[in-house]
């Protein structure tokens, strides 16, 4: 990728995997679907069951050939997040609640200004966190050991 193409990459993504979106341009215009995959290196998303194209695949070792229907990626500018209250496409903004948590809110004409919930699929970890300490993990007593005392200066290296 050249530097010109890298400049056009989206840095702060407003749409996430699992979001309910409406397609605003293309052959599936006006239809809604759930984002299946986000391709950040190309500014594209794959919507589940939308933008279907026929793909000719040559036969090889271990797989059959033929004509298959696959979901093609859409540019992120051609989809908009659906407002959970009105059901219409809206822009996405962010706001901080009173307790300090950052949430996504709907913006734009006809938007309700309601909170857009974070998709449930993002809360599920693909690989679970390890519950037992491994051979390279630091033990808890070494982590909690105090090696520096600010009042006496004990623990400072001699210069």
Image (tube, grey):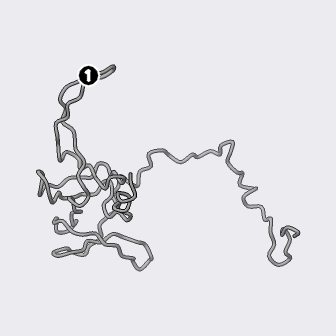
Q: Mark 1 points at which residue?
A: 59
Give the residue drawn at x 22%, y 62%: 80
Tell me where residue 141 sits by quadrant: bottom right
Of the 4 image quadrants, the one containing the C terminus is bottom right
**At 15% across and 60% down in the image, what residue appears?**
24
Q: Where is residue 139 in the image (x, y as percent from the top left)?
A: 72, 51
Relative to 115, is 50 on the left or the right?
A: left
Task: Please provide percent x and percent y for residue 34.
Answer: 24, 52
Residue nearer the viewer, 17 or 41: 41
Residue 4 versus residue 102 in the image, above or below:
above
Q: Residue drawn at (36%, 59%), measured in percent from left and top?
A: 4
Circle 1 packing at 10 Å, graded few (<14), some (14-19), many (20+), is: few
The answer to which of 9 and 61 lies nearer the viewer is 9
Q: Residue at x 21, y 63 (%)?
A: 82
Q: Residue 19: give x, y in percent of width and height.
A: 28, 57
Decide which of 43, 113 is in the foreground and name it.
43
């Amino acid at each position: 990728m050249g530097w010109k193409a890298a400049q056009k990459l989206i840095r702060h993504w407003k749409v996430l995997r699992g979001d309910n979106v409406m397609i605003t341009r293309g052959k599936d215009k006006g239809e809604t679907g759930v984002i299946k995959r986000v391709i950040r290196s190309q500014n594209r998303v794959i919507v589940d069951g939308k933008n279907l194209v026929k793909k000719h695949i040559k036969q090889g070792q271990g797989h059959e050939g033929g004509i298959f229907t696959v979901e093609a990626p859409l540019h992120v500018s051609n989809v908009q997040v659906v407002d959970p209250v009105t059901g219409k496409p809206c822009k996405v903004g962010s706001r901080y609640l009173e307790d300090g948590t950052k949430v996504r809110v709907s913006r734009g004409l006809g938007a309700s200004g309601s909170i857009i919930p974070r998709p449930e699929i993002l809360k599920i970890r693909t690989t679970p966190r390890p519950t037992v300490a491994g051979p390279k993990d630091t033990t808890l007593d070494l982590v909690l050991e105090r090696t520096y005392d600010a009042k006496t200066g004990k623990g400072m290296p001699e210069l």
